[in-house]
Amino acid sequence: MRVEMFTFLLTAAICLAGSAGVVLLRNPVHNALSLVATLFGVAVLFIQQGAYFLAAIQVIVYAGAIVILFLFVIMLLGVDKAEGIDRDPILGQRTAAIAAGVAILGLSLTALLSVGSRVTGQASTLAAIDGSEPNINALAKVLFTDYVFAFEITSVLLTVAVVGAVVLSRKAGSAIDVAEFPEGTTADLLQAKHDAAAVEQEVLEEVATEDETPEGEAETTEEALR
């Protein structure tokens, strides 16, 4: 077996195992880590095809930025609390999800079966690939000229998705989980410590004032007693 074939089979197994972990694992953190493994496997496949720029983007942007954003949102929303799954938060969301999944699967199979042996179509749909211009320069030129609005809209969609996830999962009531922080937040503990130190300082000042009685006042008190 050649090294290229062994690398392809190993990377394909990692991608398939990571994809299955994204769907089958119950812990959201484990799902995100499985997605990282899948993205790294895809990056290795890009390297095998000679697409080094796409491999770097796959690791830097997707595995290094977007998945970290997913983990941030997951940890922000909390993953250590049991939630009831008997009723959907949004009415009919399971039915809609199943219908959308079946539709996407049907469209994918239709696209694969309708093109015959050439799945990817033409070699280049934008411009002829030659050695006169580096591939990265051609890709950047197309991305930031013809598709600049689509590129910016994608970044806006990611931000809206994060904000929407936080808003939808936000529960009414106190912003602080009393069960998780029974003694209050860090700000509350620091304020209580500061108040206790201020009261202790006042008590010490009163004791020092009583101990340092002026001599004139003491003589006047003695004459009054006589």
Image (cartoon, grey):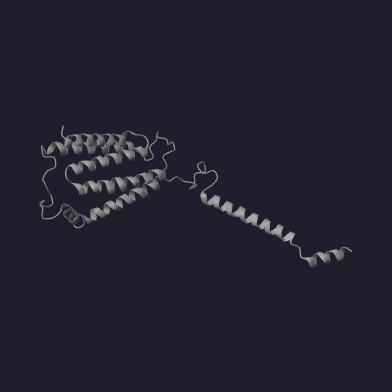
Q: Quadrant of the C terminus?
A: bottom right
Q: What residue lies at 36% left-to-right and 44% top-to-bottom?
A: 71
Foreground of the two, 209 or 180: 209
Foreground of the two, 187 or 224: 224
Q: On the picture, is 123 further left or further right than 47? A: left
Q: What residue lies at 19% left-to-right and 34% top-to-bottom?
A: 6
Residue 66 percent across, percent down from the top left: 31, 47
Q: Quadrant of the N terminus?
A: top left
Vertical order, 186 against 6 (above or below): below
Residue ranking furthest to the right: 226
Q: What residue lies at 29% left-to-right and 52% top-to-bottom?
A: 155
Residue 82 percent across, percent down from the top left: 43, 36
Foreground of the two, 3 or 173: 3
Q: On the picture, is 36 further left or further right than 79? A: left
Write down the quadrant of residue 214 in the picture: bottom right
Residue 3 percent across, percent down from the top left: 17, 36
Residue 38 percent across, percent down from the top left: 27, 39
Q: What residue lies at 31% left-to-right and 49% top-to-bottom?
A: 158
The number of callouts visible is 0
Q: On the picture, is 167 further left or further right than 124? A: right
Vertical order, 190 against 81 (above or below): below
Residue ranking furthest to the top: 1
